[in-house]
Image (cartoon, helix red, strand yellow):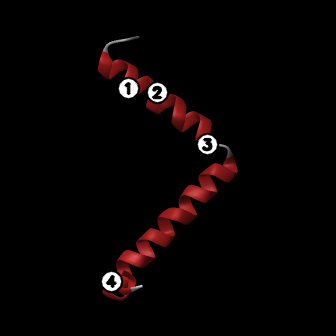
Amino acid sequence: MRLFRRSSPCGICAAILGLAMMGYGIFRGEMPVVLEKAINICMECIGIG
């Protein structure tokens, strides 16, 4: 609880906004697309693909 008292209101608002945006993206079904892009980037970095 002590950690939250030291956090700035802007940081807490940014975290809440980020979580809300993540939830909206998951609700819209964007998670598989993002996961596929992340996998492709990782494959490019290690040289497979």
Please state which of the two labelled residues, at mark 3 or mark 2, is closer to the viewer: 2
Q: Are dots 1 and 2 in contact, CB under 8 Å?
A: yes
SS state under label 2: helix
Position of residue 41 measured from the top left corner of the image (x, y, whole percent)? 39, 27
Label 3: which residue? 30
Q: Can you say which quadrant of the picture contains the C terminus?
A: top left
Distance of label 3 from label 2 (alpha carbons):
14 Å
Considering the image in quadrants, where does the N terminus appear?
bottom left
**Which image quadrant for residue 13?**
bottom left
Labelled disc at residue 42: 1
**Snapshot quadrant of residue 30:** top right
Q: Residues within 10 Å of mark 4 (few under 14, many from 20)?
A: few
Q: Residue at x 30, y 22 (%)?
A: 45
* Residue corresponding to mark 4: 8
Q: Are marks 3 and 1 in contact (CB under 8 Å)?
A: no
Q: From the image, tell me which residue sits under label 2.
A: 39
CB within 8 Å, label 4 to label 3:
no
Mark 4 lies on a secondary structure that is loop
Q: x and y percent of residue 31 in the render?
A: 60, 42
Category of crowding for the residue at label 1, using alpha-carbon neighbours closer than 10 angstroms: few (below 14), some (14–19), many (at least 20):
few
Instruction: From this view, report whether residue 28 is shown above or below residue 42.
Output: below
Please give left or right for residue 47 compared with residue 25 in the image.
left
